[in-house]
Image (cartoon, helix red, strand yellow):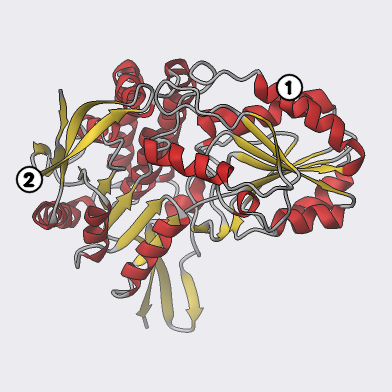
Amino acid sequence: MTHVLNFVDGSPADAGGSLTLTDPATGEAFGTSVLSGQSEVDKAMTAAARAFRTWRRSTPAERQGALLRLADALETRAEEFAGAEVRETGKIRDVVLAEEIPECVSALRFFAGAARQLEGTAAGEYLDGHTSVIRREPVGVCAQIAPWNYPLMMAVWKIAPALAAGNTVVLKPAETTPSTAVLLARVAAEFFPAGVFTVLCGDRETGRALVRHPLTDLVSITGSTRAGIDVATVAAADLKRTHLELGGNAPLLVFPDVDIADTAARIVGAACYNAGQDCTAGSRVLVHADVHDEFVTELTKAAAAQRPGVDYGPLNSRAQLDRVLGLLARLPAHARVETGGTAPGPGFQLSPTVVTGLHQDDELVQEEVFAPVLTVQAFTSEEQAIELANGVPYGLASSVWTRDVARVARVSRDLDFGCVWVNTHGPLTAEMPHGGFGHSGHGKDLSAYAFAEYTRVKHVMTRFG
């Protein structure tokens, strides 16, 4: 049986408790991880604070070199990382190797470059007889909490900008998916000083202990809106900085000038990628009434063709599967399941699901589902489409499907989401920011904007003459 340890101050470390690890593709337990308590949190934070004293003074070139070597090692050991990722998530191995790990490598290399490309106000004499200089400095010890939908990728998205800026990191992976984060820390120890990158396994209480800890300077979480509110509430008691990348409920606005079959197939792909367990996943299809029936037919056909366990993997856990099945069981009488809504097994598989006839205030429209489930609503005008799209608490991602360039300009301006895709849904790149509004949180992952999240700005003024 596998037993996953913490990685603290450059070495593996045990803890008193344990958590069961389950393969979601089979539903069978295959191992355990340690469950960290207050003692383990104290040791990890102390080591990270000690390491920060010297790491903060490393040069950008030194930080770049370490990140580039980590990127090369991840690329070289891709098969090993993929094995650990697939065992705990049930993902399709070829997708992890062809798409997810290359994106992780790309992000590490991007932030390695960002470490040496600081921007800010030019030094100068803004007051007679005084010279002003702006310093951009690391924040300190960053407590980071990663989710279970992309365990390795989200770990990379968090540690890369933080380490590039000169911070130290204590990362808590999700309790169901700790292995790739621990493996990443073990590999990173070859290139980073002890204590710079720590991984603590544990549950929600472990995360709360990290947030509360007096040595924590910044808290970053990717997770549900509920978890983000919990983190923000605890952090507020000590005025800690927070970076919250939370839930989403993305609308896809389909206008009548599109290729119906092609657009339906692409939207189903966006909904089923990673079993829909993505905060940017295509969720709410808003389609013009003129083509609604035709589009539903094509959408249903494309969804029914998706094969659970072959084209995408299972949901993360029995609890997640039961939650989604509960949402579908509570559908109002006016809703209709066009296809799917079943759990075919083995493990925690869910069939691709299309639901029509819903109203804007229905639970399935308002809640983030986090599964391969699409809802469909009709609209008759741009104004109504925008109103429906914006009529949820989330504001992370959206997409517009049309050939009309002027319509794209109007609609993208009025959509209240951190990302608007046009005639596609889902692609991300390290150079562009990812983050939302409202109940989707605040702050950005990826891009130079994420690098800035992990720095603080200091003004130094010197009188001369």
C-alpha separation, residue under disc 2 versus residue under disc 1: 51 Å
Q: Position of residue 414 (x, y in %)?
A: 76, 58
Q: Residue at x 88, y 47 (%)?
A: 406
Please tell me which residue lies in front, 369 or 346.
Answer: 346
Question: Foreground residue, 256 or 461?
Answer: 256
Q: Which mark is residue 301?
A: 1
Residue 111 visible in the current orientation: no
Name which residue type carries label 1. Answer: Lys
**Residue 6 horizontal side relative to residue 101, left or right:** left
Amino acid type, callout 2: Gly
Residue 129 or residue 415, whichever sits in front: 415
Query: Residue reaching furthest right?
Result: 290
Residue 337 visible to the viewer:
yes
Quarter of the image holding residue 137? bottom left
Which numbered mark, 2 or 1, is in the foreground of this view? Answer: 1
Helix, strand or loop for disc 1? helix
Q: Residue at x 23, y 30 (%)?
A: 183
Q: Is residue 225 left or right of residue 358?
A: left
Question: Which residue reaches farthest front?
Answer: 333
The numbered dot on residue 440 is none
In the image, is residue 109 above or below residue 53?
above
The quarter of the picture where the N terminus appears is top left
- Up the image or down, 285 lies above or below 234; here it is above
Instruction: Choose the circle earlier in sequence order: 2 or 1.
Output: 2
Across and down, in percent, residue 5 comes to 14, 36
Residue bearing mark 2: 16
Give the residue at x 13% y 53%. 37
For disc 2, the neighbor class at 10 Å (few under 14, some 14 to 19, many from 20) is few
